[in-house]
């Protein structure tokens, strides 16, 4: 943090003599490098004493121009680009691209591939959510959750690594199916990993959600109401923490999500506490989905009938999926080439963070990091 | 499963036609979403109706962006603003296409109706050069202030692809012949 001291100095010179405390607005610059952000993020905060009058997020430090780059690459190459948008949920990013191409090309994906996609996506969601569970605790001064969360993450991370060969950027989904089948021992290891999460989750929940200091730092702090959430296009755990009962997996089931029994967690108050509560609850739901999907995992091929050159026929389609942080949508315009003519990528963090200045206005400076942390964003996802 | 209170796409199309008939140039279904084409001068009225009408209830803002269709071949069209909104209550998807004049692209801002459009319009402004005259703060979002050009236009070429055409040489002989 860097701050200008001109404001308080002048206040001290001019107001101090009369013996009463005068405040005036000053600009506090948070970032671009700040440990509370997952990436490079800057916040221009106008503060008056302890109150944040206005906070303007400044983004673009990690802009890589994916929407332009994808126009010069074929669909199989793009998989590896979009995997790098939200680096905490790589495999989820690859999904809408595959689905969009499959819709235009009318490819039928075999059931085994669909089940495996669900399993991998949900395990990735657990990884993502545990990361934010860890970091949100750390941002509020509790370092212990980090160690627990990373212990659990490691077991699932190993399964993902054994399957895809990567720990963050998986590059595993193809239009039509998967790169390859899962290795031997996948079912046992995955089950063991998620069962461990289910078993230990109540303890983790108590660790923070039941903690008195945690409650005081988060309850009624940074309230986002439902109407504002809709108007800004906020999705994911943040929208559900504001009482918006929406989840693409249930509302418009893609893959085979309609075959599983899971709850859409939501909470009505829209404060930091509710957002975090939803996030933690979703870990358990994801683990349940993985269990059910492994139970029903059918044998069979993992690739549909895909021509050697993937060329989506001319047309336009909007595909949306439930990324761990919200709705990830891709609007694909194809002119029949191997490359997309235009691919608009609608990322969840982008819309979520655009609501930050609305939420941060007229809050206390001391709550700023709690609010920032509870918005669960990844800068790579915003800047693309 | 599916969303409680969801209407089928055909019903959604009927409702949109009933509410917006005279204000849109074209309406049809595309992969379950209602596709609208609308003139810039009617955009605010159309978006206001989509947002406020109880039978549509498109309160959720998904995205706003642009598409440069100038190289899309016959009937492709020119520059357009692309908006997607969604109704959480009725599960209606609406995609609005707003063709703008490529010579002086201008489109009214919808940030007064959907606050989420504030950033999306700034991005579309710098990437496509489309002006949103009544936007409260139309500054750059991603690009440096002194950046020249609008990168998402088709006429803006990637320097690497000017030097070396995509997808490049398929085998070494071809590469040698091409001097690469």
Image (cartoon, coloured by chain):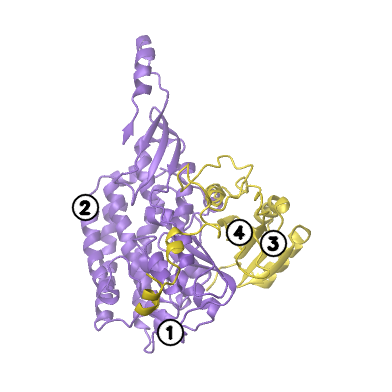
Chain colours: A purple, B yellow
Position of A284 with respect to A70 (left or right) is: left
Q: Tell how many labels.
A: 4
Real-space Cα distance between discs 3 and 1?
Answer: 37 Å
Chain of the residue where label 3 is placed in the rendered structure: B
| Residue marked by disc 3 | B37
User: Which residue is depicted at the point 48% across and 74% down?
Assistant: A99
Secondary structure at badge 4 equals strand
Real-space Cα distance between discs 1 and 2?
Answer: 41 Å
Real-space Cα distance between discs 3 and 4?
Answer: 10 Å
Asked if both marks, 3 and 1, belong to the same chain, the answer given is: no
User: Is the residue under label 4 in contact with that under label 2 (CB below 8 Å)?
Assistant: no
User: Is the residue under label 4 in contact with that under label 1 (CB below 8 Å)?
Assistant: no
| Residue marked by disc 4 | B82
Chain of the residue where label 1 is placed in the rendered structure: A
Of the two numbered discs 1 and 4 in the rendering, the one whose residue sits closer to the viewer:
4
Of the two numbered discs 1 and 2 in the rendering, the one whose residue sits closer to the viewer:
1
| Residue marked by disc 2 | A144
Q: Say above or below: A8 vs B41.
A: above
Real-space Cα distance between discs 2 and 4?
Answer: 46 Å
User: Is the residue under label 2 in contact with that under label 1 (CB below 8 Å)?
Assistant: no
Q: How many neighbours does mark 4 have within 10 angstroms: few (below 14), some (14-19), or many (20 or more)?
A: many
In the rendered structure, find residue A111 and report the number of the disc placed on it: 1
Give the mark nearest the N terminus, 3 or 4.
Answer: 3
Q: How many neighbours does mark 1 have within 10 angstroms: few (below 14), some (14-19), or many (20 or more)?
A: many
Chain of the residue where label 4 is placed in the rendered structure: B
In the rendered structure, find residue B34 and report the number of the disc placed on it: none
Secondary structure at badge 3 equals strand
Chain of the residue where label 2 is placed in the rendered structure: A
Could you say which is closer to the camera, residue A296 or residue A45?
A45
Is residue A377 in view from this perspective?
no
């Amino acid at each position: 943090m860097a701050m200008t001291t001109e404001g308080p100095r002048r206040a001290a010179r001019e107001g101090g003599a009369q013996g009463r405390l005068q405040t005036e607005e000053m600009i506090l610059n948070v970032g671009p490098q700040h440990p509370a952000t997952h990436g490079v993020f800057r916040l221009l905060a106008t503060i008056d004493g302890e109150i944040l009058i206005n906070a303007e997020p400044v983004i673009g430090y990690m802009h890589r121009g994916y929407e332009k780059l994808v126009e010069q690459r074929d669909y199989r190459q793009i998989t590896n680009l979009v995997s790098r948008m939200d680096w905490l949920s790589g495999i989820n990013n690859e999904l809408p691209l595959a689905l969009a191409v499959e819709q235009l090309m009318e490819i039928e994906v075999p059931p085994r591939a669909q089940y495996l996609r669900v399993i991998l996506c949900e395990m990735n969601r657990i990884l993502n959510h545990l990361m934010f569970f860890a970091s949100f605790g750390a941002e509020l001064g509790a370092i212990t959750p980090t160690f627990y969360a990373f212990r659990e993450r490691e077991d699932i991370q190993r399964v993902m690594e054994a399957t895809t060969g990567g720990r963050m950027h998986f590059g595993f989904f193809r239009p039509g199916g998967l790169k390859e089948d899962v290795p031997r021992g996948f079912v046992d290891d995955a089950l063991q990993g998620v069962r461990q999460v289910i078993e230990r989750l109540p303890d983790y929940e108590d660790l923070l959600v039941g903690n008195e200091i945690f409650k005081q730092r988060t309850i009624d702090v940074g309230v986002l109401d439902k109407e504002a959430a809709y108007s800004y296009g906020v999705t994911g755990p943040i929208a559900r923490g504001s009482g918006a009962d929406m989840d693409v997996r249930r509302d418009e089931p893609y893959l085979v999500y309609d075959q599983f029994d899971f709850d859409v967690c939501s909470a009505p108050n829209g404060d930091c506490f509710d957002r975090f509560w939803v996030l933690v609850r979703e870990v358990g739901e994801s683990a349940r989905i993985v269990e059910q999907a492994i139970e029903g995992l059918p044998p069979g091929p993992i690739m549909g009938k895909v021509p050697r050159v993937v060329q989506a026929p001319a047309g336009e389609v909007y595909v949306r999926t439930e990324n761990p942080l919200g709705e990830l949508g891709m609007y694909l315009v194809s002119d029949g080439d191997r490359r997309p003519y235009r691919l608009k990528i609608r990322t969840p963090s982008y819309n979520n963070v655009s609501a930050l200045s609305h939420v941060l206005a007229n809050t206390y400076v001391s709550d700023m990091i709690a609010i920032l942390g509870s918005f669960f964003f990844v800068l790579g996802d915003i800047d693309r | 499963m599916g969303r409680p209170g969801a209407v089928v796409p055909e019903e959604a199309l009927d409702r949109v036609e009933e509410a917006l008939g005279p204000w849109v140039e074209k309406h049809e279904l595309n992969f379950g979403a209602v596709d609208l084409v609308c003139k810039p001068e009617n955009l605010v009225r159309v978006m206001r109706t989509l947002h406020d009408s109880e039978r549509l209830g498109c309160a959720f803002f998904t995205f706003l962006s642009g598409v440069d269709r100038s190289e899309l071949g016959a009937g492709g069209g020119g520059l357009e603003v692309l908006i997607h909104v969604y109704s959480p209550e009725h599960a209606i998807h609406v995609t609005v296409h707003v063709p703008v004049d490529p010579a002086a692209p201008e489109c009214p801002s919808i940030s007064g109706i959907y606050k989420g459009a504030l950033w999306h319009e700034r991005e579309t402004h710098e990437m496509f050069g489309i002006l949103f005259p009544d936007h409260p703060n139309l500054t750059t979002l991603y690009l440096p202030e002194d950046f020249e050009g609008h990168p998402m236009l088709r006429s803006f070429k990637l320097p690497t692809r000017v030097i070396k055409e995509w997808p490049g040489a398929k085998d070494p002989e071809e590469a040698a012949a091409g001097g690469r």
